[in-house]
Amino acid sequence: MEQLASLTNLISIVAGVIIFLYWIHVFVILYHLIRFGVGTRPKQVSVLFLAGSIGLFTLLILTTVSVVLIS
Amino acid sequence: MALNFSFFTQSKYTFEGIRPDEEVEIFLYSHWITVVIKTLVYTILAAVPLLALIILHEEVVSRGFFGIAFLFLIAYYMILWAMYFYEIMIYLLDTWIVTDQRILDITQKGFFYRTVSELDLTKVQDISVRTKGLIQTIFDFGDVEIQSAGATNKFMFTQVAHPNIIKDRIMKLAAEARKHSEERGM
């Protein structure tokens, strides 16, 4: 039982680190598009990218919650 | 408080380091077909696990793994999304700008590898166009190579649309820049 709890903690920490790195990656892409992009297209693409990232992340959280609740 | 979205339009044809008396004449990305090819690859990568989940749906549900499988699918799509937009970012930041004074070659090869090369229009000597293969011929795109006086490195616009039109416009702009330069020198 104790081993299962520590495994769950480990999985949570790894998932947290991956999600943190994912958002760093998203931020760096957005930063480059807005900071160095010439013209309007990079800015429009950055909005689309941010919206998709937030949408997917929300879906991930909702799915995780439903999986945890079912189990 | 009104929301201000003017940053979508204000930056049109302006870039870091533009001179006050400078105007952008040509602004180029690689041809759109290069993005279409990448988009197709990512579409296939996105479709394969989704199709697998649809095909194996009943078995996955009966074993009680549907939630976990869906969770992994969403995580996979998040990674694909970030990778695809990384490619789009590289495409959008790898540009060529021709102003009425100079040519700028901006190369982005990664997050932290960016080079900006500059060539004065008066130093343009000759320009050659290279279109190779069936796809480039059909879609009218190719490479434009600019040879400058004294420079060892050639300027290369790779896989740009309508290379012959670009060549003619740069030649015209270079002639005008030389004329202005001579007038100022007199």
Image (tube, coloured by chain):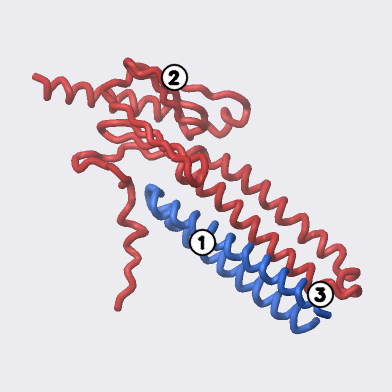
Chain colours: A blue, B red
> Percent position (x, y) of residue B180?
17, 25
Tag nearer the camera, 2 or 3: 3
Q: Amino acid at mark 1?
A: Leu
Residue A65: quarter of image:
bottom right
> Percent position (x, y) of residue B97?
36, 37
- Asked if disc 3 and disc 1 are in contact, CB closer than 8 Å, the reply is no
Identify the residue at the far left of this view.
Answer: B186
Q: Nearer the viewer, residue B135 or B180?
A: B180
Query: Mark 2 — on which chain does it sit?
Result: B
Numbered badge on residue A3: 3
Q: Residue at x 49, y 27 (%)?
A: B143
Numbered badge on residue B128: 2
Q: Is residue B137 left or right of residue B170?
A: right
SS for dot 2: strand
> Percent position (x, y) of residue B151?
35, 18
Tag nearer the camera, 3 or 1: 3
Give the residue pinned by disc 1: A48
**Badge 3 density bin: few <14, some 14–19, many ≥20, Cα 10 Å:** few
Query: Mark 1 — on which chain does it sit?
Result: A
Q: Amino acid at mark 2?
A: Ser
Residue B61: quarter of image:
bottom right
